[in-house]
Amino acid sequence: MTKQTRLELDFGRLRQQVRAILLAHGTAIAPKTETPEHVDELIDTLARSARPDVARESEALENELDALDDDLSRKVSNHFGAHMAAYGDAGYYTGLAMGLELAALTFGALATVPVIGSMRKRGRR
């Protein structure tokens, strides 16, 4: 399987998951509205699959914080940089899929609305 085919399959699965969440729970559309818990869980799952070592690194780093060695600042910075990158990418792709599915559902719904009556021309008879 080519890398492109694998990416297409992975993104297709993500879109299916996002569609199921949208249909079952909706989504936050306006600022300051709550994101459904299922969306956060999907982002978490995607981030953990992209960087499974982050959770292990977090635990190990917490243990080191007590020791306060000289390299602590660099390690904390590198760790949280990797952590932010993993969650940033996962959030971006989940958001992208969410937008695509929301658009597909919106336009699909509009396409199935039956036409009722017709507009009469107004004017002189």
Image (cartoon, rainbow, N blue to C red):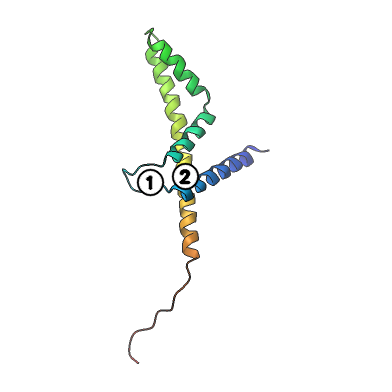
Q: Secondary structure at mark 2?
A: helix
Q: The C terminus lies in which quarter of the figure?
A: bottom left
Mark 1 → mark 2, Cα distance in angstroms: 14 Å
Q: Looking at the rendered structure, which numbered label has been put on residue 124?
A: none
Q: Secondary structure at mark 1?
A: loop
What crowding class fits label 1: few (fewer than 14 Cα within 10 Å), some (14-19), or many (20 or more)? few
Q: Quadrant of residue 122?
A: bottom left
Q: Quadrant of residue 87?
A: top left
What crowding class fits label 2: few (fewer than 14 Cα within 10 Å), some (14-19), or many (20 or more)? some
Q: Is residue 44 above or below residue 80?
A: below
Q: Residue furthest front?
A: 24
72 to the left or right of 46: left
Q: Is residue 97 above or below residue 75?
A: below
Residue at 49 percent across and 19 percent down: it is 56
Q: Which residue is mark 1?
A: 28
Residue at 57 percent across and 43 percent down: it is 13
Residue at 54 percent across and 30 percent down: it is 49
What amino acid does circle 2 point to? Leu
Q: Nearer the viewer, residue 85 or 118?
A: 118
2 to the left or right of 43: right
Total tally of numbered discs in the picture:
2
Q: Which residue is mark 2?
A: 96
Q: Indicate which disc, 1 or 2, sits on the residue closer to the N terminus.
A: 1
Q: Position of residue 98 (x, y in %)?
A: 46, 46
What amino acid does circle 1 point to? Ala
Q: Position of residue 61 (x, y in %)?
A: 43, 15
Q: Residue furthest left?
A: 32
Q: Position of residue 69 (x, y in %)?
A: 39, 7
Q: Position of residue 65 (x, y in %)?
A: 38, 12
Q: The N terminus lies in which quarter of the figure?
A: top right
